[in-house]
Image: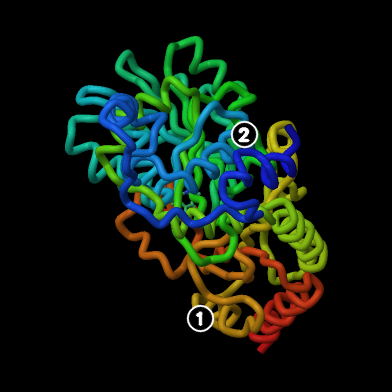
């Protein structure tokens, strides 16, 4: 099924709700049954029946079908945040004494979940370095032990965009009987299909591109039916980190325009990079499809396209120059997160990195841009002006 068909039609049974083109918001916690037998059947199989909205909700069910189909997965669960989806996945796959190999710079709270929460339950973690030239297969193999149960990938990551060779890593894991999971938030299922490359689980922060309007926080976990059913029965129902019916409806609305938004964000990023790449105040550009990037071959092998976020290293004399650069941008708001309609800038210097190991620290002169839906030429000249400001300072 084509993406547009999934997004517009899959899972919608419009005759059930008076032909409404948009499904109603099933704003209900509870579902009633016509007799004891029906109730008994439903409670015996909560995976397939709506009993209580901590499990199934018809509006959420529509989203689940669409998200699973877009990823090429059997099923998907929707959570109240990306972190909830990741936590639920890790809790379901790892037990006391188990070990996980993780990409060295995953989304920040993933390291926290591993090092500060799950480590307290007797689970061990090894973080493997990826460089721009090493897509990581050998690093994952070398870091593995008999107790290794899961390899956790994020490709690309969202500050320096290191790439993992997904297919090779998935094949190596399967040979060793180790499960694999990937955070696919940056590419979305439209630009990267990890399950078709052999990955077992895909997680997303749907707060980013998938919802796309900076108005909700949500997460997704996709995989094979048996595995997802086991997670649903034993962890999802118990953790209770579910999306609200109203947020599910907002996510569905965001999803309708994902292909258009993603294309605009990505096309604009390319235009902007072409506009700014030669500026003398830029030392380096981090973007998987840019020629400064050393691992473009693997990126282009596995990514259908590259989304609208990139980082630059600024040539500066002091942190004051970076502050000045970011404060002089007019069309980019200073904020965390990304994937919405609005363009954003995030200077790495705002992180306090002093407690982080040297190897995973971001360069302090790194600045990340997320490109939203505004006019790309205006965005580009806004960045150029701010870059010119730095150059002026340097000449003084
Ligand atoms: C934001 C983000 C997360 C966490 O998702 P939340 O919805 O904020 O909990 C995970 N991974 C990546 C790549 C992210 O950008």
Relative to 55, 391 lies left or right = right
Q: What mark, if any, has residue 298 been given in the picture?
A: none
Mark before the other along the chain sequence, 2 or 1:
2
Extreme residue in the bottom direction: 396
- Crowding around mark 1 (Cα neighbors within 10 Å: few <14, some 14 to 19, many 20+) is few
Read off the residue under disc 2.
Answer: 69
In the displayed structure, would residue 170 be above or below residue 211?
Answer: above
**Disc 2 + disc 1, Cβ < 8 Å:** no
Relative to 283, 179 lies left or right = left
Q: Work out whether residue 234 can be spotted.
A: no
Relative to 305, 59 lies left or right = left
Label 2: which secondary element: helix
Comparing labels 2 and 1, the label whose residue is closer to the camera = 2
In the displayed structure, would residue 65 be above or below residue 7?
Answer: above
Read off the residue under disc 1.
Answer: 320
Q: Residue at position x 30%, y 40% from top? A: 114
Q: Quadrant of the C terminus?
A: bottom right
Extreme residue in the front direction: 35
x, y percent for residue 243: 40, 51
x, y percent for residue 100: 35, 28
Q: Work out whether residue 304 can be spotted.
A: yes
Nearer to me, 260 or 343: 260
């Amino acid at each position: 099924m084509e993406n547009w068909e999934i997004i517009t039609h899959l899972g919608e049974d419009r005759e059930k709700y008076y032909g409404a083109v948009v499904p109603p918001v099933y704003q209900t916690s509870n579902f009633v049954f016509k007799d004891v037998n029906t109730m008994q059947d439903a409670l015996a199989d909560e995976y397939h029946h709506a009993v209580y909205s901590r499990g199934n909700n018809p509006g959420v069910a529509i989203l689940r079908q669409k998200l699973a189909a877009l990823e090429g997965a059997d099923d998907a669960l929707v959570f109240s945040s990306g972190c909830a989806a990741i936590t639920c996945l890790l809790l379901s796959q790892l037990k006391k004494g188990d070990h996980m190999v993780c990409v060295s710079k995953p989304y920040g709270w993933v390291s926290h979940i591993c090092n500060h929460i799950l480590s307290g339950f007797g689970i061990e973690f090894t973080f493997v370095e990826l460089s721009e030239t090493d897509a990581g297969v050998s690093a994952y193999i070398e870091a593995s032990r008999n107790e290794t149960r899961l390899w956790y990938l994020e490709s690309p990551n969202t500050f320096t965009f290191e790439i993992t060779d997904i297919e090779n890593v998935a094949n190596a894991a399967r040979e060793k009987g180790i499960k694999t999971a990937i955070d696919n938030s940056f590419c979305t299922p439209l630009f990267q299909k990890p399950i078709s490359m052999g990955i077992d689980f895909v997680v997303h922060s749907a707060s980013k591109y998938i919802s796309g309007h900076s108005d909700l926080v949500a997460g997704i976990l996709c995989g094979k039916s048996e595995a997802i059913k086991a997670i649903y029965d034993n962890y999802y129902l118990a953790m209770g980190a579910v999306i609200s019916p109203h947020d599910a409806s907002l996510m569905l609305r965001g999803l309708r325009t994902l292909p258009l938004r993603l294309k605009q964000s990505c096309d604009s990023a390319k235009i902007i990079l072409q506009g700014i790449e030669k500026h003398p105040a830029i030392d380096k550009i981090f973007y998987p499809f840019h020629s400064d990037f050393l691992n473009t071959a693997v990126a282009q092998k596995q990514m259908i396209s590259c989304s609208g976020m990139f980082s630059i290293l600024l040539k500066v004399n002091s942190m004051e120059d970076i502050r000045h650069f970011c404060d002089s941008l007019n069309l980019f708001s200073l904020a965390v997160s990304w994937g919405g309609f609005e363009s954003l800038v995030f200077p790495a210097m705002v992180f306090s990195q002093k407690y982080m190991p040297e190897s995973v620290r971001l360069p302090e002169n790194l600045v990340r841009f997320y490109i939203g839906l505004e006019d790309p030429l205006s965005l580009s000249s806004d960045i150029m002006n701010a870059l010119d400001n730095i150059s002026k300072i340097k000449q003084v």
